[in-house]
Image (cartoon, rainbow, N blue to C red):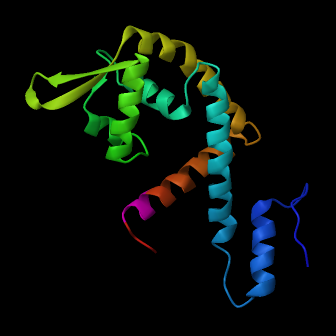
Amino acid sequence: MSYLVDDEQDIADAGIGLWNEERPEIDTSGKAITGRILRLNEIILDRMNETTQKFGVKYSTYAVIATLRASGEPYRMTPKALQSTMLISSGGLSNLMRKIEEQGYIRRSIDPKDGRGVLVELTPEGFALSEEAMPVQAATERNMVRMLSEEEQKTLVDLLRRMVLVNSMGTRG
């Protein structure tokens, strides 16, 4: 039997159908959620990149710039503080920061409070980009959840937060 994505079934339904046909003894109920989250991750990143491409940057670059801007004056953070707000490894962040610095949107300097530490701050060009891109990005994000009522959005936020917190702690229950 073939499972196709159509107006009533999405890619998760198709995959679950295949699993259930071939391995009916396996409980695939988790796939109904995780499969959709994984697919949404792809869709969301594609949309974010489409939006930030209008400003000549990838979403990952925008995310660093916007995080620094959202941190408040003087728009400066340590790499560790920056990483704690982003879903990226320290090595990945270091490489990304190097690229963003080459683009002229951030600069790294020695932390005057800790001569071994580094501070990452927005340049005037990075600040200008953030001012232009942040409202557009926020509109894209609102558009992506427009089909959900305010109450549904609140419920989804609460459920996703719980999943993130429980799974971040390594708890499997």
Q: Percent from the top left, x then y, of residue 78? A: 25, 31
**Which stretch appears magenta?**
165-169
Res. 98 image quadrant: top left
Q: Nearer the viewer, residue 47 or 149?
A: 47
Q: Residue at x 23, y 26 (%)?
A: 119
Residue 70 in view in this figure: no
Q: Percent from the top left, x then y, of residue 154? A: 60, 45
Res. 95 image quadrant: top left
Q: Report the side of 73 relative to 88 (left or right).
A: left
Residue 163 in view in this figure: yes
Q: Report the side of 66 relative to 22 (left or right).
A: left
Query: In the rendered view of the protein, which quadrant contains the N terminus?
Result: bottom right
Q: Residue at x 75, y 73 (%)?
A: 16
Q: State yes or no: residue 96 in magenta.
A: no
Q: Report the side of 103 relative to 120 (left or right).
A: right
Res. 90 image quadrant: top left
Q: Percent from the top left, x then y, of residue 94? A: 33, 37
Q: Residue at x 41, y 28 (%)?
A: 99
Q: State yes or no: residue 168 in magenta.
A: yes
Overall secondary structure of the magenta section:
helix
Q: Compared with residue 32, is residue 80 higher up or lower down, i.e. above or below?
A: above
Q: Nearer the viewer, residue 136 or 118?
A: 118
Q: Residue at x 78, y 86 (%)?
A: 22
Q: Compared with residue 16, is residue 65 higher up or lower down, i.e. above or below?
A: above
